[in-house]
Every structure is written in C-alpha cells, then in structure tokens.
Image (cartoon, grey):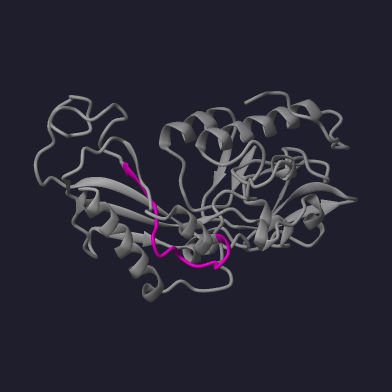
Amino acid sequence: WQVAGGMQRLPEAMARLAAERGVRFRYGRAVTELALERGRITGVKLEGGERLPARAVVLNADVAALAAGLLGEPPRRAVRAVAPAERSLSALTLSLHTPARGFPLSLHNVFFSGDYEAEFRDLTELRRLPRQPTLYVCAQDRDARAPGPGGDGGGGGGIRAEGAPERLFCIINAPATGDRERFTEADIEPCVQQGMELLSRCGLHILRTPSSCRITSPTDFERRFPATGGALYGRATHGAMATFRRPGARTRIPGLYLAGGSVHPGPGVPMAALSGRLAAECLLADSGSIARSRPAATPGGI
C-alpha cells in the first residue's frame, strides 16, 4: 500500500499505525495520471514522471476532477460529470483567533439571516455572495453542552477569562463558481461585514483584524480542489433521486475505487470515513477476482 499526493501530513499517531501495517507515504508528490492498460487500472503516475504500479487504486479526490480529465483522459469514463448547476454550495470561511463577548456561545452556533429566501435566491439563482448571509460559528475552545451560568458556553465548566482570544471558525454559504469568477476583496468584504453586523445584532461581538482573521473563498477552494468551482459537498442533494446519482465506491474501471465527501454516503468527516471503509470493503471483496468491477447496492439505512 502506498499513499501519494497531497501536502497535508497525517497526524503522527495515525501515520505510525499505518506504517506498522505496511503503508508507505509519499508527501508532496502530486498524482498527475491514473495508468490504465486494457481498460483496467495498473497504477498511478506522479509529478516528475515516476510510476507506481498497482492492481487497485482508492482515489480520495473530488469526482469532478476525475470527470474533467485532470487524472488522464481514459479514466474520465469512470464517473459521470457534475454539471455546474448540479454542484453543492461553496463557502466563505473565516478562521479567527480573537476575543468574543456578549453571547453565550456553545461549540456549534447558527445565526440565521432575516430573509432566508432572499439569501438562497442570491446563491442559487443570481449566483452571487448573499447580501444577508446566515453564519455558522464553531467556537472550538468551548464544548457542546448548554452555556453555563457565566455565559461561557462551557456547560458550567468555568467562566472564560474576559477578553481572552479563542478559536472561532465561521462559515457563510457561497455559490460554487470559483472556476468561473475570481472572488476579490471587493466582493467578499461587504458580505463578511453584513455577517459581522448580524452577529452584533444578536449580541455577539467579535474583534476582527487582518492579523486575527484568515478568509477562504470559493476561488481558494477551487484552487485546492480543481474542477469543483469550490463546491464543498460534491453533487447537490436536491431532488428525490439525487442520492442515487452520487457515485459509490466501485467505478466503471476495474481496480479503481472512490472515497471522500463527493461519493456515497456523502460529505462530512463521519460520512467520508464511511466512504473509505466502503471502498476498502469493496476492494477486499474483489481481490482475487479483481479483473472485473461490478455494480452493487450498499446495505444500510438512515
């Protein structure tokens, strides 16, 4: 087993556990192509020309990159392309380390727009950043229990020091158009400012400075996940049949398996972890007769 591509290192303990089981990691080596012979997977080609032979490959990338031919022309047929209109939403994210006061935050908090219908009209019809955004705020240094008597969001676990900086991660919905337009500061700042004013009206006051806040836009997400437009959740889940259009672990190419948030069962860390488990189960079930991938239903429920 070899893991190639990507710049983000795995946590040390997980990497050590994997290495004990025979995994070798190749950090900072982008995968440029999936190698096929006679219609089945035979390995991957790395930046610089190195080729890693393989009887099976588990691809943890957004399927849009595969369908767009970014991993070679022949592998494009493995999945159906996702049209821009079928993409899920992207986001503006704000990573802050700053004091927050005036509102009893818990770990997870949502501050809703005053006009939810207008917000989604901006996102889905006008394809622009919302003029009245909803904000999700994750107060990472607090826990998920109800706010304590001191308004510390720690379930009574102690009053936070007044004015102490804390880690806050904020999400504002955005259209997945990062491949067609570059979101500039002139586009982003009015939307973020409206979000900050919403928090203030709800009693939450955050000191936001250039040094305390880092913003990531659909343009940045497109750069990290090419061919997605910045869509964070793969195909949109609208409609009764949308779930069935999401690719499963097996593909039309023998030996190529899929994992990640753009495939079944869906986005989010728990779902992406399940997709990896499903891919591993399919690969192991097919080993020994791996010359042909076959369609299969995945058992389970809600």
Q: Does 92 appear above or below 258?
A: below
Q: Position of residue 156 (x, y in %)?
A: 18, 24
Q: Which residues are magenta?
A: 124-138
Q: Does 294 appear above or below 26?
A: above
Q: Position of residue 5 (x, y in %)?
A: 58, 52
* Helix, strand or loop for the magenta stretch, by majority: loop
Q: Is residue 213 left or right of residue 225?
A: left
Residue at horizontal 82%, vertical 46%? 253
For the N terminus, the image quarter is top right
Asked whether 216 or 89 is in front, the reply is 89
Asked whether 227 or 40 is in front, the reply is 227
Picture quarter containing residue 92?
bottom left
Total tally of numbered discs in the picture: 0
Q: Does 171 appear above or below 155?
A: below
Asked whether 223 or 16 is in front, the reply is 223
Can you see residue 39? Answer: yes
Picture quarter containing residue 25?
top right
Q: Residue furthest right?
A: 38
Q: Is residue 210 left or right of residue 85?
A: left
Q: Is residue 18 left or right of residue 234?
A: left
Can you see residue 50? Answer: no
Residue at horizontal 84%, vertical 28%? 288
